[in-house]
Amino acid sequence: MNFFKKLFNIPIEEDKEINKQEDILTLDDLFVHNFMEKGGKFLYCSKKQEVLENYKKILAENNWKEVGLLDDKLTSFFKNNATRALKPYKEETPVFTSCEHLISDSGDILFSSNQLGSIKLREYPDNFIVYATTSQLVKDTGQALTGIKANCTKNLPTNISAVKNYIINKNDDNFLNYGNSNSKNLYLLLLEDL
């Protein structure tokens, strides 16, 4: 490395200063980086039509004909679509829902009883398709919980939990994780709304 520094006449002090500088990422860049690093599948959409197109591609790629619908606000995805919405869902069907927030500093997706009802996240099927917007991005868990409190002043949701890993490991031998995994094979359809 010193050979190149001498060849291009780069002062060592300047090189150290460059390495010290931190990359400052926007909330969306930070979220996407952390989300994908954990194994999440991310599809950015600039228009509602792109969301519908990407949704259909996910279904076709996985040969899914039925989807468990957790959020009634998303019924528009099933109009003029070959996929059937199931409510309640079946154990083996993928789940389609919205979320509360996208947490940038960890790449987690936060849900509450608004999406999950009273069923624990780990009890849902392994495959999730999540629809979210860029306005749902927050810096950290504290901001996410504050956002829930601000948005739901009259009726605070319960059952707040997050998907923290997007690679399902059925062979996890760690006895501390037994029955406590929120890992999901998760597709995120993120719509730019800001």
Image (cartoon, rainbow, N blue to C red):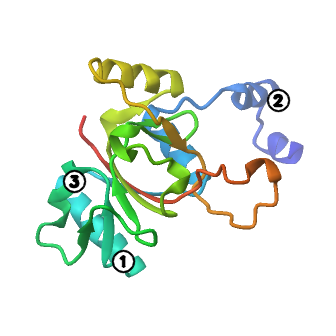
Kindly identify which residue carries mark 3. 74
User: Of 51 and 17, which appears nearest the observer?
Assistant: 51
Kindly identify which residue carries mark 1. 64
Do residues under tags 1 and 2 come within 8 Å of each other at their CB atoms? Answer: no
Neighbor class of circle 3 (other Cα within 10 Å; few <14, some 14-19, many 20+) is: some
Kindly identify which residue carries mark 2. 12
- Residue at 20% across, 52% down: 47
**Element type at mark 1:** loop
- Residue at 73% across, 54% down: 178
Q: Nearer the viewer, mark 3 or mark 2?
A: 3
Quadrant of the rendered structure where residue 49 is? bottom left
Mark-to-mark CA distance, 3 and 1: 17 Å
Quadrant of the rendered structure where residue 42 is? bottom left
Q: Would residue 3 appear left or right of 106 to someone viewing this image?
A: right
Q: What amino acid does circle 2 point to?
A: Ile
Neighbor class of circle 1 (other Cα within 10 Å; few <14, some 14-19, many 20+) is: some
Q: Position of residue 142 (x, y in %)?
A: 51, 21
Neighbor class of circle 2 (other Cα within 10 Å; few <14, some 14-19, many 20+) is: few
- Residue at 35% across, 64% down: 89
Q: Position of residue 70 (x, y in %)?
A: 32, 53
Looking at marks 3 and 2 on the same chain, the residue that comes earlier in the sequence is marked by 2
Res 27 visible: yes
Q: Position of residue 85 (x, y in %)?
A: 24, 67
Quadrant of the rendered structure where residue 14 is? top right
Do residues under tags 3 and 2 come within 8 Å of each other at their CB atoms? Answer: no
Q: What amino acid does circle 3 point to?
A: Leu
Q: Nearer the viewer, mark 1 or mark 2?
A: 1
**Element type at mark 3:** helix
Position of the C terminus, as image quadrant, is top left
